[in-house]
């Protein structure tokens, strides 16, 4: 039997990943009632455990796991205020990052009203008329061509000159 085929804690195979999560929630409830951990810490642990099932890439899962530990420690020691403080530190860190000279959180921070149109729903590339403000210098604000929309190839039409009468190709 391979390692991924083993059943966790005697649960049936489809529920194998759910049983440890539910048992952790039950133990978390008992720890909160005993007064050892704040309820915010249990909520953070459960949300991050559920969210870990939706992580598509392993490298993202590693960084999310490290952030999860930071949030758990902050929520466990300082409660809800620690959670808000940790969230504030992560947002400040993301706002200070730059990728290829462009702020990571742009156009939200620093605020760029012209770029907010593509924050949640992105237009096709051919619909952009202006270059992004952070990438363009003052003399190069427009894109190269006016007609950038891709068109389907022109039809060559039906070629009928090679057909001969009587060979079965006419209709």
Image (spheres, grey):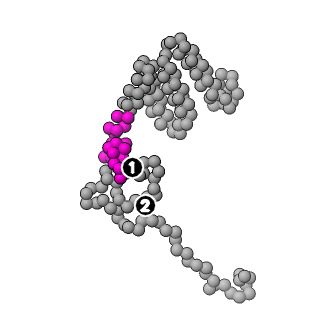
The kind of secondary structure element at disc 1 is: helix
Q: Is residue 6 visible?
A: no
Seen at 31% across and 53% down, the residue is: 133
Seen at 56% across and 34% down, the residue is: 53
Q: Nearer the viewer, residue 156 or 50?
A: 50
User: Quick check: 121 left or right of 164?
Assistant: left
Q: Nearer the viewer, residue 83 or 104?
A: 83
Seen as rendered, the residue at the extreme top is: 34
Q: Which mark is residue 78?
A: none
Q: State the extent of the magenta-drawn residues as a range.
A: 91-115
Seen at 42% across and 48% down, the residue is: 119
- Mark earlier in primary sequence (1, 2): 1
Which residue position is annotated with label 2?
Answer: 127
Seen as rendered, the residue at the extreme front is: 113
Q: Quadrant of residue 168?
A: bottom right
Q: In the rendered view, would you say 108 is above or below 28?
A: below
State yes or no: residue 100 in magenta. yes
Q: CA distance from mark 1 to mark 2?
A: 15 Å
Q: Quadrant of residue 90?
A: top left
Which residue position is annotated with label 1?
Answer: 116
Q: Quadrant of the C terminus?
A: bottom right
Foreground tag (1 vs 2): 1
Q: Quadrant of the N terminus?
A: top right
Q: In the rendered view, would you say 90 is above or below 144?
A: above
State yes or no: residue 5 in magenta. no
The kind of secondary structure element at disc 2 is: helix
State the image coordinates of residue 157 (x, y, percent, origin top left): 58, 78
State the image coordinates of residue 113 (x, y, percent, origin top left): 35, 50
Q: In the rendered view, would you say 68 is above or below 161?
A: above
């Amino acid at each position: 039997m391979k390692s991924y085929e083993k059943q966790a804690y005697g649960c049936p195979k489809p529920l194998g990943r759910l049983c440890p999560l539910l048992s952790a929630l039950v133990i978390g409830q008992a720890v909160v009632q005993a007064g050892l951990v704040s309820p915010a810490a249990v909520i953070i642990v459960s949300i991050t455990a559920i969210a870990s099932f939706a992580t598509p890439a392993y490298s993202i899962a590693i960084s999310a796991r490290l952030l999860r530990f930071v949030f758990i420690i902050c929520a466990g020691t300082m409660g809800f205020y620690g959670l808000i403080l940790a969230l504030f530190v992560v947002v400040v860190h993301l706002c200070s990052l730059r990728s290829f000279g462009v702020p990571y959180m742009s156009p939200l921070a620093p605020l760029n009203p012209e770029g907010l149109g593509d924050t949640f729903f992105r237009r096709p590339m051919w619909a952009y008329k202006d270059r992004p403000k952070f990438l363009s210098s003052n003399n190069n604000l427009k894109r190269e061509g006016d007609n950038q929309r891709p068109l389907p190839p022109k039809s060559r039409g039906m070629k009928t000159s090679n057909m001969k009468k009587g060979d079965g190709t006419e209709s």
